[in-house]
Amino acid sequence: MAAASFALALLLYLGLDLPEAAPAQSYAADPDTVVEITYGSVIKLMHERTKFRLHSHDVPYGSGSGQQSVTSFPNIDDANSYWIVRPQPDSSAKQGDPITHGTTIRLQHMRTRKWLHSHLHASPITGNLEVSCFGGENESDTGDYWRLEVEGSGKTWRQDQRIRLRHVDTGGYLHSHDRKYTRIAGGQQEVCGVGDKRPDNLWLAAEGVYLPVIQRK
């Protein structure tokens, strides 16, 4: 019941539409049910190997672009680790549509409304591609575009499937590792982009508010 109440409150906060006659319980991820990720869902992405969550906060990088920093975070209950799954601006996709392998998506940080972004600036710890948050509700560019790669036999993104996200502009895979910051973001892991497939660029959809698939007529 607590999960359902949280889900409903989060949907109302985001201004997302509720399908008619849909029970509130259907919005919270159920660990015993295979759930498809749809546009408009609010999720946490878990780094498969370290179990840290993709995270951002209103703290700029002290080097590189100076944009809002992105890390991976050890605690599962931090609200700064929620991301809204969005289509490209020119897409015909709608809220509640499922997302298939090869689709280009955007991830919007729920708290700050900025977009998961990358470019050719160097990441602070390893010197790979920096990953930041940038823009806002009415400001987004191709630096916010990520191509979904679903691992395994399924072609639709589900909660139980490992994925990679490949940045469209740079070709870098969203990546994390056990190298940690020691100062402002102490204990949090670096998130960066790397140009090749590695075990450390695998992610899973974890906690969140999963909107049900809407059947289109």
Image (cartoon, rainbow, N blue to C red):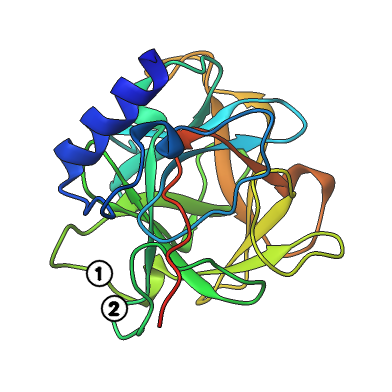
Is mark 2 in CB contact (under 8 Å) with mark 1?
yes
| Distance between mark 2 and mark 1 Cα atoms | 8 Å
Q: Nearer the viewer, residue 194 or 7?
A: 7
- Residue 177, by quadrant, is top right
Residue 146, given in percent of the width and then of the height, sits at 51, 67
Q: Secondary structure at mark 1?
A: loop
Q: Nearer the viewer, residue 112 or 67?
A: 112
Residue 63 placement, left or right of 155: left
The residue shown at (30%, 74%) is 141
Residue 50 placement, left or right of 65: right
Residue occupied by mark 2: 89
Q: Secondary structure at mark 2?
A: loop
Q: Amino acid at mark 1?
A: Ser
Q: Is residue 58 in sight in this rendering? A: no
Residue 74, given in percent of the width and then of the height, sits at 56, 17
Badge 2 crowding class, 10 Å Cα cut-off, few under 14, some 14 to 19, many 20 or more, is few
The residue shown at (52%, 66%) is 98
Residue occupied by mark 1: 140
- Comparing labels 2 and 1, the label whose residue is closer to the camera: 2
